[in-house]
């Protein structure tokens, strides 16, 4: 090898001696990282996504089992595979689903079986697992590991079919304490109001509760002076009959379902999203809810049918003095139906952004629609101003 007479820091990319020095520096750097204490390396790994942390096992013998002490979020999200199987769903695809389901269950069981950390931040399981007995063990694992965020999304290929949903058993929470939970997300999981109320009363740090597509949820009473709950989401629980809310810390509510919501005490509510038949109750009895509506900063209204069925002129609204963001999802029989929204926009003097998602039920012409400006947008129809303030407005006509 040619001897290098260059100074220590003066390296030449074409010099073999200098190239060797660079390789040695990189090797030394790698060795120094590997020589860090195990608890420091595990801390690094726990800030990575689970799959990336597991891949470090191939680096060297030193790293081979460190991933098993990963304490971040164990993320088993196979939703992309589920989408690939969704269409078309013939007999062959059903066989493929069964194969993927077995493969997914084996994957989760293997990782959880090898896991050695005392705690985990979160557990996410997203796949069509059916009514598998393994799910009980997964939940018990999470509770024993003092999980903070638990998400079970068992969306299946038969979206409208509620048969065969996994039912969350109450004994799991009596045998293992759920007190560490800060967020619970359940989708296509059958859960009763009794279980949810038990969790709310026994989880002093629970701030986020989301339940979607549960056929066994009939009623829910949210109350208690010590509740930490700040975000509540209830969607499409088809047999739901009653919801009462008395939550001093509740900031955000998203609800899609029948008109069974009773606001008892929500002094901190700032974000409200409603859809389904409950929307009509809000509109028809808007002044009864004016005490908290006037505090709202964000309001999302999704009309479940033609706008004319839910908004009748002249419709009056109390002043929404703090409202900054308004999103409306509407179905129109005629483009002129948008004028029914004028009282709502006029009642919002502080509005910064309006998002309008409109779909046409029948053909209409947009020859009279003009959009002016780039930052501030005003909309005119038949030369009459629909919105009186120059605020950001986003339109979408699919």
Image (cartoon, grey):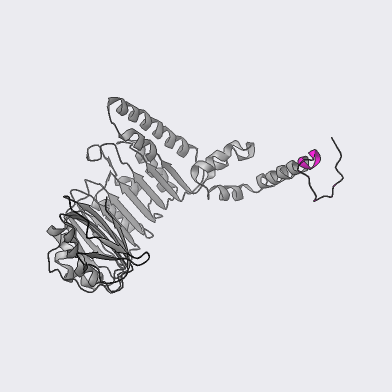
Do we see residue 380 in this rendering?
A: yes
Considering only vertical position in the picture, is 260 above or below 55?
Answer: below
The residue under the point 37% across, 54% down is: 183
In front of the other: 85 or 57: 85
Magenta highlight: main SS: loop
The residue under the point 17% across, 68% down is: 286
Residue 11 counted in the magenta span = yes
- From the top left corner, tell me how far across and down residue 150 is, in percent: 38, 49
The residue under the point 46% across, 35% down is: 110
Considering only vertical position in the picture, is 254 above or below 270?
Answer: above
Count all numbered tags in the image, as a single digit.
Answer: 0
Q: Which residues are magenta?
A: 6-19
- From the top left corner, tell me how far across and down residue 254 is, in percent: 28, 58
In front of the other: 372 or 213: 372
385 vs 101, left or right, is left
Do we see residue 272 in this rendering?
A: no
The residue under the point 33% across, 30% down is: 97
- From the top left corner, tell me how far across and down residue 376 is, in percent: 35, 67
Q: Quadrant of residue 303?
A: bottom left
- From the top left corner, tell me how far across and down residue 1 is, in percent: 84, 35
Residue 295 counted in the magenta span = no
In front of the other: 40 or 320: 320
Considering only vertical position in the picture, is 73 above or below 2?
Answer: below
Q: Quadrant of residue 34?
A: top right
295 vs 80, left or right, is left
46 vs 264, left or right, is right
């Amino acid at each position: 090898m040619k001897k290098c007479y260059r100074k220590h820091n003066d390296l030449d990319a074409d010099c073999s001696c200098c190239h060797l020095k660079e390789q040695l520096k990189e090797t030394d750097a790698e060795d120094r990282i590997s020589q860090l204490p195990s608890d420091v390396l595990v801390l690094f790994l726990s800030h990575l996504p689970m799959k990336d942390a597991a891949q470090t096992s191939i680096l060297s013998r030193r790293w081979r089992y460190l991933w098993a002490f990963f304490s971040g979020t164990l993320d088993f999200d196979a939703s992309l595979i589920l989408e690939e199987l969704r269409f078309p769903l013939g007999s062959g695809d059903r066989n493929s689903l069964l194969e993927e389901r077995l493969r997914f269950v084996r994957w989760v069981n293997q990782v959880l079986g090898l896991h050695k950390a005392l705690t985990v931040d979160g557990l996410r399981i997203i796949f069509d697992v059916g009514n598998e007995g393994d799910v009980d063990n997964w939940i018990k694992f999470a509770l024993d590991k003092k999980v903070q965020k638990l998400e079970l999304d068992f969306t299946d290929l038969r979206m409208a079919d509620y048969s065969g949903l996994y039912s969350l058993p109450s004994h799991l929470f009596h045998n293992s304490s759920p007190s560490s939970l800060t967020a619970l997300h359940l989708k296509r999981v059958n859960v009763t109001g009794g279980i949810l109320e038990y969790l709310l009363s026994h989880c002093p740090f629970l701030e986020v509760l989301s339940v979607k597509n549960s056929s066994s949820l009939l009623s829910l009473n949210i109350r208690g002076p010590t509740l930490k709950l700040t975000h509540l989401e209830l969607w499409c629980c088809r047999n739901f009959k009653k919801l009462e809310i008395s939550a001093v810390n509740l900031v955000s509510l998203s609800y899609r379902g029948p008109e069974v919501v009773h606001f008892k005490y929500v002094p901190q509510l700032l974000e409200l999203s409603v859809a389904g038949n409950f929307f009509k109750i809000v509109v028809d009895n808007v002044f009864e809810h004016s005490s908290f509506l006037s505090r709202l900063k964000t309001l999302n209204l999704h009309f479940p049918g033609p706008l004319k069925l839910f908004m009748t002129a002249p419709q009056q609204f109390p002043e929404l003095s703090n409202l900054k963001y308004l999103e409306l999802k509407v179905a129109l029989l005629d483009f002129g139906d948008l004028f029914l929204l004028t009282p709502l926009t006029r009642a919002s003097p502080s509005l910064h952004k309006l998002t309008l998602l409109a779909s046409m039920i029948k053909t209409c012409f947009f020859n009279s629609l003009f959009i002016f400006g780039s930052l501030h947008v005003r909309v005119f129809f038949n030369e009459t101003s629909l919105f009186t303030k120059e605020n950001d407005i986003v339109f979408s006509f699919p």
